[in-house]
Amino acid sequence: MTARLALMVLTEARTLARTGPDGELIPLDEQDRALWDRTAIAEGTALAEEALAQGPAGDYQLQAAIAALHDEAERAEDTDWPEILALYELLVHRTPGPAAALGRAVAVAMVHGPRAGPVEVDALAGVWEGHYRLAAVRAHLLERAGELDAARAAYRAAADGTLSEPGARYLRMRADRLVP
């Protein structure tokens, strides 16, 4: 229960920075961290630490610890990606699902370089074939690796695959800004 509350508080702490003035989505690494609620982050981090101290880490404890590491970083480049990757390794081992594996793929790219990420994402294709999130993460990692044509195509595929209009707008905008 404590871990779930920690995860909710840590996630809610970033609410004001998640969308722009026109409702556009803003990814975590581009959010204005000055808009994050530092009081909520302190509360959520304390709850996450309390939950981790209660015994063997479960899914929510691991997810809360990952959220706390993101929230504690003053700047995106200060994020403790090696620790996040270690937590995702534990999470994927405990709960081998596509969502955790996709988060792990991003962490792999952040630790081992952007070209390592798409390899991890491609390994998930059989599990999430055709799912827009797979294409969106692949696009982001390809963009980071400098493969702009492939990233543009993946962003468009992700936009075509989502039912969320704000999400589709965001993904099309990301594709359109990668002009050849």
Image: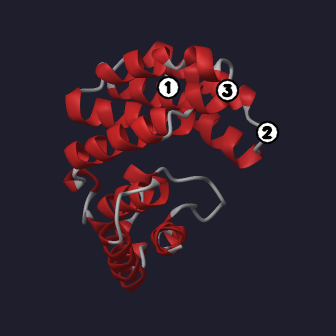
Q: Quadrant for residue 116, please give it.
A: top left
Amino acid residing under circle 2: Leu
Q: Which element carries disc 2, helix, strand or loop?
A: loop
Q: Report the residue at 46% width, 22% height from top.
A: 121
Amino acid residing under circle 1: Ala
Q: Report the residue at 48% width, 59% height from top.
A: 60
* Place of residue 11 in the rendered image (x, y in percent of width and height, measured from the top left): 50, 66
Give neighbour class at mark 1: few <14, some 14-19, many 20+ (Cα, 10 Å).
Answer: many
Q: Which mark is residue 81?
A: none
Closer to the chain start, of discs 1 and 2, is 1
* Place of residue 39 in the rendered image (x, y in percent of width and height, measured from the top left): 38, 85
Which is nearer the eye, 1 or 108? 1
Give neighbour class at mark 2: few <14, some 14-19, many 20+ (Cα, 10 Å).
Answer: few
Label pair 2/3, CB-CB below 8 angstroms: no
Q: Report the residue at 33% width, 81% height from top.
A: 42
Instruction: Tell me the residue that label 3 is attached to.
Output: 131
Is residue 74 toward the left or the right of residue 55 in the image? Answer: left
Q: Report the residue at 40% width, 76% height from top.
A: 44
Q: Which mark is residue 139?
A: 1
Q: Which mark is residue 163?
A: 2
Residue 50 vertical placement versus 14 (above, below) = below
Q: Which callout, 2 or 3, points to the residue nearer the camera?
A: 3
* Place of residue 173 in the rendered image (x, y in percent of width and height, measured from the top left): 59, 37
Closer to the chain start, of discs 2 and 3, is 3
Q: Which element carries disc 3, helix, strand or loop?
A: loop
Label pair 1/3, CB-CB below 8 angstroms: no
The colour scheme used here is secondary structure
Q: CA distance from mark 1 to mark 3?
A: 13 Å
Residue 45 vertical placement versus 23 (above, below) = below
Q: Given the current orientation, which residue lies at the most extreme front position?
A: 55
